[in-house]
Image (cartoon, rainbow, N blue to C red):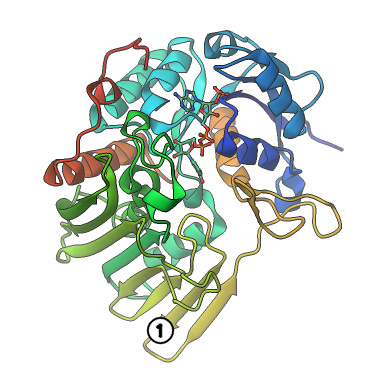
Amino acid sequence: MSTKKYQLKWGILATGEIAKSFARDLTVNPETRGRKDIEHVVVAAASSSSADRAKAYLKEVNAPASAKPYGSYKELVADSNIDIIYVATPHSHHFQNAMLALEAGKNVLCEKAFTANAAQAELLIKKAKEKNVFLMEAVWTRYMPISIYARDLIKSGKIGTVERVSSDLSFASAPEDNFDDKHRLVNPDLAGGALLDLGIYSLTWVFQTLYTVQDKPQPPTVLSSIRKYKLGCDQQTSMLLTFPRKEGDAHGIATTSLRVGMDPAKNGEAGPCIRIQGTKGEIQVFPPTFNPRKSKLILDDGTVEEKDWTHPGPGPGSGFYNGFAGDFGPEGQGMGMFWEADECADALREGRKEGQYESLHESLVIMQTMDEVRKQGNFRLPEKVESTEYPLDL
Ligand SMILES: NC(=O)c1ccc[n+]([C@@H]2O[C@H](COP(=O)([O-])OP(=O)(O)OC[C@H]3O[C@@H](n4cnc5c(N)ncnc54)[C@H](OP(=O)(O)O)[C@@H]3O)[C@@H](O)[C@H]2O)c1
């Protein structure tokens, strides 16, 4: 006897690079990852520039022919056929766009960094509660099996008490040679800079191993250093976070840079980008920090356990590729964004209003941490980007 699958109907807000990767992953059959009970379908997409662009996007990501293209985000959030909106604009725009969707009573999955600052995040959380809808920051890494494995190992006590975690996400991509001044990675008008774009992943690993796993987690104190780029945003940031705990403070070291690379030869020779160090051993996670596919557990009794984390998908010979901005993975493997999409389906089916591996409160604490880092580095974004006024034309 076949049971009916729970179908989640997605509306995609924006048609840029990550919106393409995400929607392509939605087309991967969930059964390839052992999920026979859910399915995802893209029912609409909107571009802020034109309905034609939305139409081309839907075609490119292989959405069903019935999916509707919209030429404005306002039309998208008014579509009653949509269960959840995926916000995939630059982070400067997340507050305005997510608020638009929440105001319309829609559930929302919002790309990282959640917002430009904590004050904006707080207002989104308040609005989601008021409207009784689901809201989640799209930190896909948290929903990957490798993250679940690392957190479970920590909770099992196998590596003892975790005293220190270091985590880096850096690309040697000198901004003056690689990005024009309008690019979202360096443009203050688009909330550019390494911290909000890449450093959020370094922080993700520090938080999910030192904060998420605690019974009563406390926000960390912050010491940090920022090196700015000529346009005013950060190009290299280092953070030392102290997490208060009953068994003694733990240290998290989170770094990000556009000047040096975590894996210069792109072959893993540089070693782990994340080290989770406990009193009885450590877990190493290998680049890239946001989508790692290799881990190594080393215990003080000499045990070494190496694991490869290939992603499920339609498999070799399928002609399916997914990745980001042309940097595609092996044939037949999904990019790995579907696990966070599955979490949205599970939450909506169960009536949960937030993700199970990163509460909205934790997203807020991380935004507060990044606010403090920016304050210490005297790095402020343009007023309209930092603004909590809604609606506001950016
Ligand atoms: N999860 C991940 O691994 C991952 C990877 C990369 C990026 N991201 C996050 O995803 C978000 C988007 O990044 P992306 O690389 O997809 O950016 P992108 O390629 O530049 O796309 C952004 C899209 O946002 C829309 N948009 C609306 N107003 C805009 C404005 N003033 N300037 C530029 N674009 C505007 C545009 O779509 P329309 O014209 O269709 O409206 C544009 O295509 C960022 O917050 C980023 O941090 C996440």
Taking 44 as reference, is 74 left or right? left
Residue at 64 percent across and 49 percent down: it is 326
Q: Residue at x 41, y 34 (%)?
A: 182
In the picture, which quadrant includes the N terminus?
Answer: top right
**x, y percent for residue 147:** 48, 58
Is residue 267 placed above or below 50 in the rendered structure? below
Work out whether 188 lies above or below 179. Answer: above
Farthest residue to the bottom: give it.
302
From the top left corner, tell me how far across and down residue 350 is, in percent: 55, 31
Q: Which of 163 and 377 is in front in this view?
A: 377
Q: Mark 1 points at which residue?
A: 299
Could you tell whether 13 is left or right of 237 in the image? right
Count of numbered marks: 1
Q: What residue type is labelled 1?
A: Leu
**Residue located at (36% from left, 88% from top):** 300
Residue sitting at 43 percent across and 11 percent down? 103
